Image (spheres, helix red, strand yellow):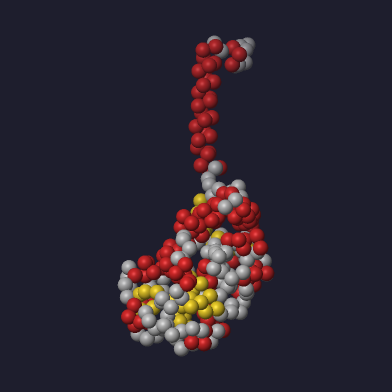
Amino acid sequence: MSAPFSTLSMPPPLFAVLRRRAGLLLACAACVLLPATASAREFVVQNEGHLQHARALVRAAMEAGGLKAEFVDAPAGNEKRNVHMISSGVTHVDMMPATPARLQLVKEGKLRMIPVPLDRGLLGYRINLLLDSQKHKLSNVKSAADLRAYSMGQNVGWMDVEIYRAAGIPTKEIKNWSNGEFATQMEAGFVDLFPLGLEETLTYFLPHFQKQYPQLTIDPYILVRYPWFRFVWVSPNPDADALYDALQQGFDRIVEDGRFLEIWAQYCKPPPDTAFRLRTIIDIDNPFYGYDLVPARYRKLLYKQVPR
């Protein structure tokens, strides 16, 4: 009877050849399996033109917290749709102002909040866009009571609507605004003003709007101020648990070591002092929350012009 087949009985050269071939087969198998086992995680994150600084800060915080992943753009929508998408887990992260609806969802465990002021409190300084032909319209306005003579436009679902109305200022909701379409509403006499955040207007919105509506300009006479903060919001679903933990740790780290302000300065710039000095600042209340909504550890991020 012949002896059982064994590699021990092979000539050394033949055994070496077979061993090399087996190694190559294993390597090829590993290459075939690799894409299925090592694909990068993906998170759906809000992405709009004026939020590039916020998106960069979210990415930096995520990586500082030890998590690397790819971002997929969330569908654009109004605030009502954004709240639905983030609370249901369709979107993993968005960067929107704090509203009573969002704060209530946080209390109910249906949404997660990282209260870091992505706009450094400057979002609470509102500058009015208006027609260039009417740019002196507010020259005599000195108080919230004076503003009640004018009609403001805001996007459908924005909580600013309720803030202005609580101050007695007539405010109308406009469905299309993101490219400056409200200019036609102004020309028709439907609204007089369209207030937006000071820094984001000077940096992004005004030049963006003027591409299609060059008749728009900014009011040179007043700023309206109230507590209004853009925070980071995270889906409550379990698939975002690691992301939420990484962002909490990461934001603490990049705020403490100074990277937050470095990244912010790459995308944004504080308005010039003349933006404040040459305008009357009109304070109105936010009936839903105050400046203390920002935790003490993040308050050093607030721009120096913001009341403490």
Q: Is residue 253 visible?
A: yes
The total number of labels drawn is 0
Q: Is residue 82 visible?
A: no
141 sits left or right of 291 in the view: left
**Quarter of the view holding residue 102:** bottom right
Q: Residue furthest bottom?
A: 149
Can you give x and y, in whole percent of width and height, for residue 67 in the image?
58, 49
**Quarter of the view holding residue 216:** bottom left
Foreground of the two, 99 or 117:
117
Can you give x and y, in whole percent of width and height, for residue 231 in the image?
57, 64
7 is higher (above) or lower (below) than 156: above
Residue placed at 55% from the left, 64% from the top? 303
Quarter of the figure with the C terminus: bottom right
Can you give x and y, in whole percent of width and height, for residue 278 in the image?
45, 74
Foreground of the two, 196 or 86:
196
Residue placed at 42% from the left, 80% from the top? 193
Can you give x and y, in whole percent of width and height, for residue 70 in the image?
51, 51
Foreground of the two, 228 or 265:
265
Foreground of the two, 194 or 271:
271
Residue placed at 42% from the left, 67% from the top? 202
Residue placed at 51% from the left, 21% from the top? 20
159 sits left or right of 139 in the view: right
Quarter of the figure with the N terminus: top right
